[in-house]
Image (tube, grey):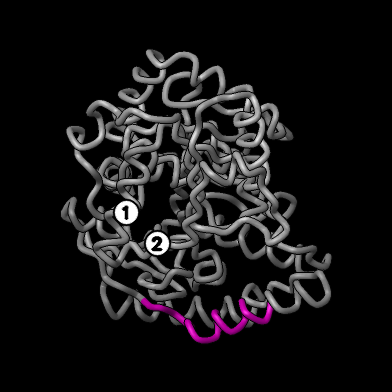
Amino acid sequence: MKIGLATEIDIRRKEAWSGTILHMVRALEQEGAHLEMLGPVCERETITLRRIDKVLRRLIGEDPMLNRTRMMTRRKGRQVLKLANSSAVDVLLAPVGSTLIADLPPSEIPVVYCSDATVRLMLDYYDWYGAPSKTARNRAIASEGAAMQRADLLTFPTHWAARSAIEDYGIDPSRVFVQPFGANMEHPPTREEVLGPREPGPFRLLFCGVQWKRKGGDIVIEAAERLVASGVDVELTILGCTPPKDWVPSNALRRVTTVIPFLDKNRMDERKRFRDIFACADLFVLPTQAECYGVVFCEAAAFGTVSLGTATGGVPEVIREGETGFTLPPGSNGSDYAAKIEKIFADPQRLEQMRYAARADFEQRLNWSVWAKMFLTRLESL
């Protein structure tokens, strides 16, 4: 089977779904699939329009969603079909590429659309979507709806997203395939590397996220302050971002907190440090306020690290409650997280069992190899 991969942006770019498409492609190729790269299609225009959208969101508080105009979707659709025909592909795969297939001309080539959410879910969920005008909002919904109707198969990592496609867009459930994504790691650690005895010392908490506010950085800080004040022997590592400049921690918390703004996984030394941090953590804490899936929870599971997150979006389908981690209700504050962490800290035997369960979940479900096998099997039905 020759799969044509249609993308708007070079999959090696960070903007290409934060590396998810690249890991998806690698997994498919490792399973023997033949992928033909169709694109990037209109990459320069797409990036330019996204930047304009971002500026306008800051200036006027509205997102015009210029990349979803009919002029752009028609142009992209024609170009995608031309590339697909010239490459003689058997099937067309468009990961987060609704604008590529919304106005795709008629063809006998089966089309597969892949995403982790829908526009209807995101518009009232992710604050960085801004406040689109009624025109832009309707345009975005209509464009994605057309893309979903054009697709022969729609694949999502969660039932949360799949339900929206079925209920909000009227997609036939028989055309929807749900399979969890995997950890975005080229060389995951082995069981032997991560399931050995933990090093003695304080209870090590890890927070990892780029967007401080959305990921719940303030909640983690509040929780850590309460734990320290209660005399709990903890250590906090903040990875991937920096606390706000106005953050003034207590001296006690400052002594046990390490902030690492950025690690480049393409550099061997920094990649090793990233792995060491996850492997040493006793609990991965991410009080995210909005999350479509949460690939980072898959990464934590790969290291046998138990997760504590928020029961929002697709997170409850990644973390298996009470088995591989825990979730707290949306709106939970630092005090709530501190109380939960204290309970986890007080039961080391259960935590150890959950470490093994988290790693097993990564091996059996939360890795790209499993996703690729299941996806290719489903693809055969087309």
Above or below residue 222? Residue 40 is below
- What's the residue type where badge 1 is placed? Arg
Determine if the magenta segment contains residue 4.
no
Q: Residue at x 35, y 20 (%)?
A: 352
Residue at image mark 1: 273
Q: Say which quadrant the N terminus sits in.
A: bottom left
The answer to whether one can see residue 287 in this image is yes
Q: Are marks 1 and 2 in contact (CB under 8 Å)?
A: yes
x and y percent of residue 61 in the render? 81, 69
Whether residue 170 is visible to the viewer of this picture, yes or no, is: no
Residue found at x 42% / y 25% = 324
The x and y percentages for residue 316 are: 54, 31
Q: Nearer the viewer, residue 130 or 340?
A: 340
Quick check: 66 left or right of 137?
left
Magenta stretch, overall SS: helix
Marks 1 and 2, the one that precedes in the sequence: 2
Q: What kind of residue is marked 2?
A: Leu
Depth order, front residue of 128/32: 128
Picture layout, residue 148 above or below residue 201: below
Residue range (magenta): 39-53
For the residue carrying disc 2, how many other residues have a C-alpha within 10 Å: few (<14), some (14-19), or many (20+)? some
* Residue 48 horizontal/vertical position (percent): 58, 84
Give the crowd class for mark 1: few <14, some 14-19, many >=20 residues within 10 Å: some
Q: Which residue is mark 2?
A: 263
Element on which disc 1 rests: helix
